[in-house]
Image: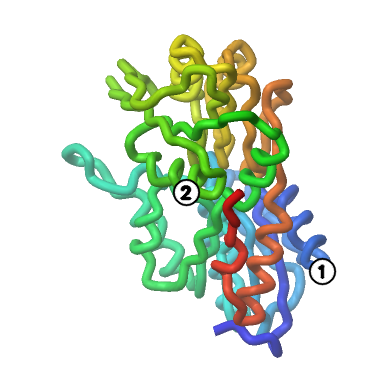
Amino acid sequence: MPSRFNPIKIFSGGSSKYLAEQIAGKYGIDLGETVVNQFSDGEFQPEIQETVRGCDVFFIQSLVPPADNLLELLLLIDAAKRASAHYITAVIPYFGYARQDRKDKPRVPISAKLIANLLHAAGVSRVMTMDLHAPQIQGFFDIPVDHLDSSTIFIPYIRSLNLENPVIGAPDMGGSKRARYFANPLQADLVICDKHRKRANQVEEMHLIGDVENRHVIIVDDMIDTGGTIVKAAEMMIEKGAKSVRAFCTHPVLSGNAHERIANSVLEELVVCDTIPLKEKNPKIHVLGVADLFARAIHNVYEYSSISSLFDVKED
């Protein structure tokens, strides 16, 4: 277990340096130095530029494409382990491959489980992440997992909007539990979109369960990829009489023509976290920072304090 008597050091992988600098700053220390040595054939070798012997080390890296980001994190963990780090925590704001959490058809991998195995094999002592696509992925690990929740960031912002008669929307049946977690402290009703996919990233049909007439709808989800589901849900809710529709999605994957789709949608705004850097600016996208939450979570891990206390959201 980590000890307050062991020095703490925070390092970053290439995909999250922008966020790691903010987290280290919020914590009150400098971000540790690393370099990536590149060979002519494309092979690379991360190198930690300062001693970590006896230290509690935190590596910050979101697992966004390309897969080199995952490999870089694994190599950094291995380097720290071989340099006699006392305790190694992988801080993964966006846990990629989390959608592949089960064998839903023949001859496909359970990729989220494989990633968990790779992290454990590399030598990580603990994992910290945020809004997993499926919370049960925590069970894929045989080490502690700290699962941070974006509600502590989103709910204060929702309250600041002072919307009259809001309703919380789940984009699919699987997201109903997350939506209810938002609805309870806001004392809002819940509506659910029942969707059927023809194939990955393509919604074939969608139906609405619940009433949105003359209501301000807030759709909540863990991530937004192509934006197809959210945009279609917003259009359907406006057709059903909603006054406005906003979407709150933690991880802005936003692949393909998602930015254009969001910009041309009926959405009032899309609110996301900076777990993944935006590829382009979009007037409809509002970004909320997670650095303070992660810095406090790292502090509580280091000091043996409660993590769940960070997510006490009181009812209105």
| Residue located at (41% from left, 56% from top) | 115
Q: Gap between marks 1 and 2, in whole Å?
A: 34 Å
Which residue carries the number 1 mark?
29
Horizontally, residue 289 falls left or right of residue 100, namely right
Q: Position of residue 2 (x, y in %)?
A: 60, 82
Q: Residues within 10 Å of mark 2 (few under 14, many from 20)?
A: some
Specify the amino acid type for callout 1.
Ile
Between discs 1 and 2, the one toward the N terminus: 1
Q: Position of residue 277 (x, y in %)?
A: 67, 39
Q: Residue 178's mark?
A: none
Image vertical order of residue 81 relative to residue 136, above or below: below
| Residue located at (67% from left, 81% from top) | 55
Which residue carries the number 2 mark?
181
* The quarter of the displayed image where residue 155 is located: top right
Q: Residues within 10 Å of mark 1 (few under 14, many from 20)?
A: few
> SS class of the residue under badge 2?
helix
Horizontally, residue 102 falls left or right of residue 220, namely left
Q: Residue placed farthest to the bottom in the image? A: 5
Image vertical order of residue 297 relative to residue 216, above or below: below
